[in-house]
Amino acid sequence: MARPSDTRQRIQAAARELFASQGVRKTSLQEIADRLGITKPALYYHFSSREDLVRSIVQPLIDEGEAFLRRQEAKGEVDARAMLGEYFDFHLRHREELMLILTELTTLAELGLVQVVLSWRERLAALLIGPEPTLVMAARATMALGGVQDCVVQFPHAPADELREATVGAALAVLGIPG
């Protein structure tokens, strides 16, 4: 007999696949249940709504992202190369969830998750360039941090170590920090 956590994980996996192929709004809970061969009430046992299911899929990214930020903020002085490398690694681990966020901004905005991610960039930028940057430096930080995220998505078939090195180097260059 499947444990509840196993069924929950199977539901999340099926939902990820369907969300990726047809979008969150076009995927019904009935379709997810049908894919798994379970009843809709069985699905409701694990998730009270589609929004609850989406949140459960992206919550690990949110939790780990917040922990990453707290660790960076606790360091005091930041090594930009190391921080950008860890930021890259974080996005690489959560590439699937990141794709869901990027393709379903409206749904995720309704869940309040887009604002969370945007606030992360502000906090990271403050660590990289200080709390009161010029507009030029704020734009550079936004481009560097967004670029790290974008490279993880844009080049899914590139070897991770090569992509990490190229991405971190480019982010440092945008910031005007010697590589």
Image: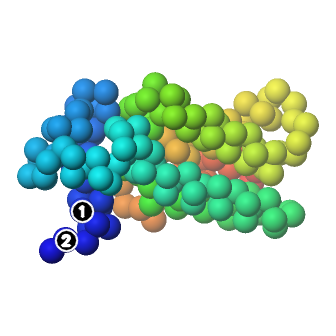
How far across and how far down the image is residue 20, in percent?
A: 27, 39
Residue ranking furthest to the right: 132
Q: Which mark is residue 169?
A: none
Mark 2 Cα-neighbour bin, 10 Å: few <14, some 14–19, many ≥20:
few
Q: Residue placed at 19% from the left, 44% from the top?
A: 40
Q: In this view, does 104 lie to the left or right of 78?
A: left
Q: In this view, does 166 lie to the left or right of 10?
A: right
Please state which of residues 101 and 173 is positioned toward the viewer in this rendering.
101
Q: In this view, does 19 lie to the left or right of 130?
A: left
Residue named by callout 2: 2
The amino acid type, in three-letter code, at marker 1 is Thr
**Is residue 157 among the parts visible in the rendering?**
no
Residue named by callout 1: 7
Describe the element under mark 1 as helix, strand or loop: helix
Please state which of residues 24 and 168 is positioned toward the viewer in this rendering.
24
Mark nearer the N terminus (2 vs 1): 2
Q: Residue placed at 76% from the left, 46% from the top?
A: 123
Q: Quadrant of the C terminus?
A: bottom right
User: Pointer 2 and pointer 1: residues touching (CB < 8 Å)?
Assistant: yes
